[in-house]
Image (cartoon, coloured by chain):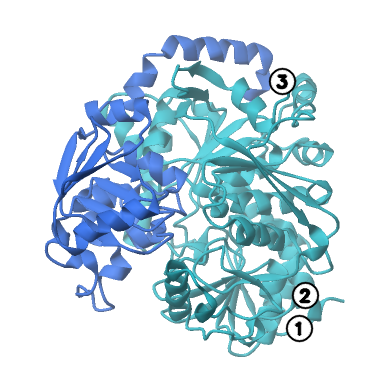
Chain colours: A blue, B cyan
Amino acid sequence: MQKFNTLKSIPAYLPIVNIDTDMIIPKQFLKTIKRTGLGKNLFFEMRYDDQGKEIGDFVLNQNPFNNSKILIAGKNFGCGSSREHAPWALLDFGITCVISSSFADIFYSNCFKNGILPIVLEEEKIKELSEYANRKEEISVDLNENKIVYGNNEIKFDVDKFKKKCLLEGLDDIALSLKKSEKIENFEKDLKNQKPWIFND
Amino acid sequence: MPNTLYDKIWNDHLVDLQDDGTALLFVDRHLVHEVTSPQAFEGLRNSNRKVRHPNLTLAVADHNVPTTDRSKGISDKESKIQVETLEANCKEFGIKLFGMNDKRQGIVHVTGPEQGFTQPGTVIVCGDSHTATHGAFGSLAFGIGTSEVEHVLATQTLVQKKAKNFRVNVNGKLPLGVTSKDVILQIIGKIGTAGGTGCVIEYAGDLIRSLSVEQRMTICNMTIEGGARAGLIAPDEKIFKYLKDRPMSPKDKDWDKAMEYWKNLKTDEGAKFDKEIDLQAEEILPMITWGTSPQDVITIDEKVPNPQNEKDEDRKNSLERSLNYMGLKPNMAAKDIKIDKVFIGSCTNGRIEDLREAAKILKDKKIAAHVHAMVVPGSGLVKEQAEQEGLDKIFVNSGFEWREPGCSMCLAMNADKLKPQERCASTSNRNFEGRQGRGGRTHLVSPGMAAAAAISGNLDDVRKYQN
């Protein structure tokens, strides 16, 4: 996994609430057996017309937002399906930080598995940051310091310590868990005694 | 200290707990399907890892499979590759798979319970958000992403943080024609699509206890639409009876031992909930969704909302966007919404009781001439059972198409989809923009309401057709 440390970019602002994972990446692109290559289909239905031409009004089709690494969006971002294709599509497009006033649980945890930092801020702060998108000015995100710097201001944000460490170091979750193999084995031994039916299917 | 049912299942599955609250949770049951697993298996291969417990894993192809004649295989090239990849992966890693032509094949959340793979007190995961369905059995069941699928395959555990406890109490009796689908739509309307974020919801109250196992599954299934990852209901005699003698249920001595454990799976008196709401069943009416979010609910007697009445600017914009997408006018009566298609099926409402409920309304009636309607049973076994009961004939005689099992038009990954601007009364779970096909318009309803809509040609009140 790509490490996440600091990030500087003009943010793109998508002021829509309840952006679901079907909007982020529609089902016709879930047929892939790969993780990569989904960026061109990110927000497909908002981004292209029926003929497959880019819709000029859509923010990610406009310069400089087509190069944004930071996306600011309405509340409850990533609701709906568990498809990890949603963060894969964002990542492939180049977005590695999403800022919203709330995220759906599964999407939120999927982000961390892919080197994407989701940041939760109050609505007021979102509005403030969105001005930087409107003015096409850069903001920067510093995960080490848990802060976003914009102009002469900064905002602190919360992130789970363990998740932060994994992002900063680009750690492989599975390898970390496998270090606890002994504990897993002990658990399984007890389970076989206490609930034998679990293994006898 | 008194514990909730969620607390108890959580505590019973803790392999490790770090100081910061990050837990390693043991996973008893892992369901796998073709869409969210290929990259996980590829990850295992790339790092030379094995599946830790193939026998705790069950695979079935459901999202991509055709619902028409399967003798010719899958015509869509990408779908075919994905289904074949699942077959190859299951073979390589020694995982049991119900193939496309196995009569046990079906939607993963219909198949799991049917086989007795789903059991009370277990932790069940699947790379699919509607895994919440299995909570009807008193299991902690939730959807995970593909990286987590890989993690479970490799370690049989999952890294988790504990969620909050949220209880939804529903008491009383449902009026005639009102079903568990209406109950869950009402709940989502009340709490909103983010109302359950960060929580596990326990459904309680005498109405919940009076529901059948399948009706409970419908409620738990759509918990994710209220933002909660998992919904659960304490198991009782109905659950135990349902599970007895299922192919993968515990047998003999194991059954007795399991029963001892299962019987104690309930929330202790006085246990603390972080959130709690109450609903009275008598006040719930047949529901429809009018918009593009499952929280956009009204009763069949109501009118579509008017954005002009909204003070909040974001909410107003969102209403306008939804109405525009749905091609509806403010203040339009629900019953004036004309439909083109009807879809009965999905992991929400594709089980035998759902088909019975719809067939009861459709018996000796014809669907409206302009309506195209289809039934997609949740599994091969549901299909077989329905055919034994003659339900297929009722559907076909009324003008419905009778299809092969799968996810079908719930998410339109196979050939079953809406055309732009087509409007559908659907028993599925999501009315998102483009969900059932680009530009397609979805109204979520119960199976009885879907049948009523098919007959009338517009959204209509199922009570009108009730004997």
Could you give the CA–CA distance between mark 3 and mark 2, rounded to whole angstroms? Answer: 49 Å
Q: Which residue is mark 1?
A: B365
- Tell me the SS state at disc 3: loop
Label 2 belongs to which residue?
A: B361
Q: Is B36 situated left or right of B373 in this image?
A: left
Q: What amino acid does circle 1 point to?
A: Lys
Dot 3 and dot 2 residues touching (CB under 8 Å): no
Q: Is residue B173 left or right of residue B154?
A: right
Mark 1 or mark 3, whichever is nearer to me? 3
Q: Are marks 3 and 2 on the same chain?
A: yes
Q: Nearer the viewer, residue B396 or B210?
A: B210
- The part of the image, by quadrant, that contains residue B406 is bottom right
Q: State the residue at coordinates (16%, 62%).
A: A135
Looking at the rendered image, the disc whose residue lies closer to the viewer, 1 or 2, is 2
Name which residue type carries label 3: Met
Pick whichever, A113 or A18, lies toward us: A18
Location of residue B73 in the rendering, given as x and y in whole percent from the top left corner: 43, 59
- Figure check: B42 above or below B83: above
Q: Which mark is residue A151?
A: none
Give the secondary structure at mark 2. Answer: helix
Instruction: Give the CA separation, mark 1 to mark 2.
Output: 8 Å
* Residue located beneath label 3 in the image: B1
Q: State which quarter of the image contains the N terminus of chain B.
A: top right
Task: Tell me the crowding category of disc 2: few under 14, some 14 to 19, or many 20 or more residues within 10 angstroms, Cα based.
Answer: many
Q: Give residue B51's position: percent from left, percent from top.
A: 42, 26
Q: Secondary structure at mark 1?
A: loop
Q: What subunit carries mark 1?
A: B
